[in-house]
Image (cartoon, rainbow, N blue to C red):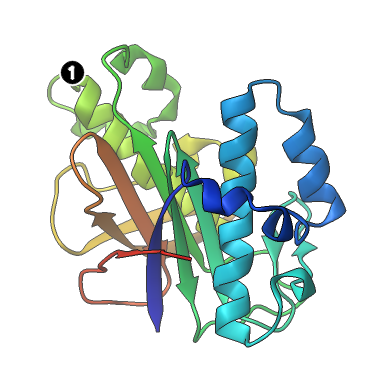
Amino acid sequence: MLKIWRVALDDPAHLDPPRLATLDQQEHQRWQSLRKAQDARRYAAAHTALRAILASELACSPSEIQYLHNAWGKPFLAHGPAFSLSHSGPLALIALQSDSPISESRSEMSIGIDIELQSQDTDPSWFVDCWSPAEQRRMSQPLSAEQALRLWVRKEAVLKAVGRGLHLPMSQVVLPLGQSQRMRAISHCEGQSTFWHLYDIDVGQGQFAALASHRVYRQPTVMDWLG
């Protein structure tokens, strides 16, 4: 079963002391290291929400959630659902795939989600190194900033599902350039090619979001996390 939660990060309830106390040492250090107060608050809110959602799924306390990390620093659970977290600006998305537990030996996450806010300052030239040769051959005309950002979000969702994030160049992910309810993407990593099911996620105007998964779903829907 797939669940996707939208979290409003500026809700002060996320930063109640009992919730903050559930963060582990690594999360606490990251939270304290962020220089901008707003970034720090939103990071803490996203991670307390993730713990609360996982705890609800596993019927345990949020403080009992113990993450393992793969070789590229991506967190996962040894005995629990696959999950992915992304946040941008005041919103976070948390995807939970409860029928895909991950073993301790696996580096692949099996699911990835990404969200990005649109910005007037976005420049398509920022993404020039992201495109694979196959994608470049199919680009009959320059991309708009909106098109480039949408493709970036799709690629980042795949990279999160691969389990390496930006440690794997975006050019190693090949996407469909159009839009449809069901899309396929291919990741190339260490001589192996993997197919992914890819979905654009509707989270409202001014934001792009995408989900990548090994599994086929009907068009995913988003629920608001009320905590």
Residue at left 39%, top 34%? Answer: 132
Q: Is residue 163 above or below residue 140?
A: below
> In the depicted view, which residue is nearer to us: 218 or 54?
54
Residue at left 64%, top 53%? Answer: 16
Please indicate whether residue 161 sits to the left or right of residue 126 in the image. right
> In the depicted view, which residue is nearer to us: 57 or 165?
57
Please indicate whether residue 48 sits to the left or right of residue 34 in the image. left
Residue at left 72%, top 60%? Answer: 18
Q: Is residue 105 shown to the viewer in this render?
A: no
**Residue 24 image point, x, y percent:** 82, 57
Q: Is residue 20 shown to the viewer in this render?
A: yes
> In the depicted view, which residue is nearer to us: 173 or 21?
21
Please indicate whether residue 164 sits to the left or right of residue 124 in the image. right
**Residue 13 image point, x, y percent:** 54, 53
Res. 217 image quadrant: bottom left
Res. 141 image quadrant: top left
Q: Which residue is mark 1?
A: 142
Q: Is residue 126 above or below residue 54?
A: above
- Seen from this angle, which residue lies furthest right? 25
Please indicate whether residue 66 sits to the left or right of residue 19 in the image. right
Q: Is residue 181 above or below residue 47?
A: below
Question: Label 1 crowding class (10 Å Cα cut-off): few <14, some 14-19, many 20+?
Answer: few
Count the numbered circles shown: 1
**Residue 76 image point, x, y percent:** 68, 67
Q: Is residue 92 above or below residue 206?
A: below
Say what amino acid the circle numbered 1 marks: Pro
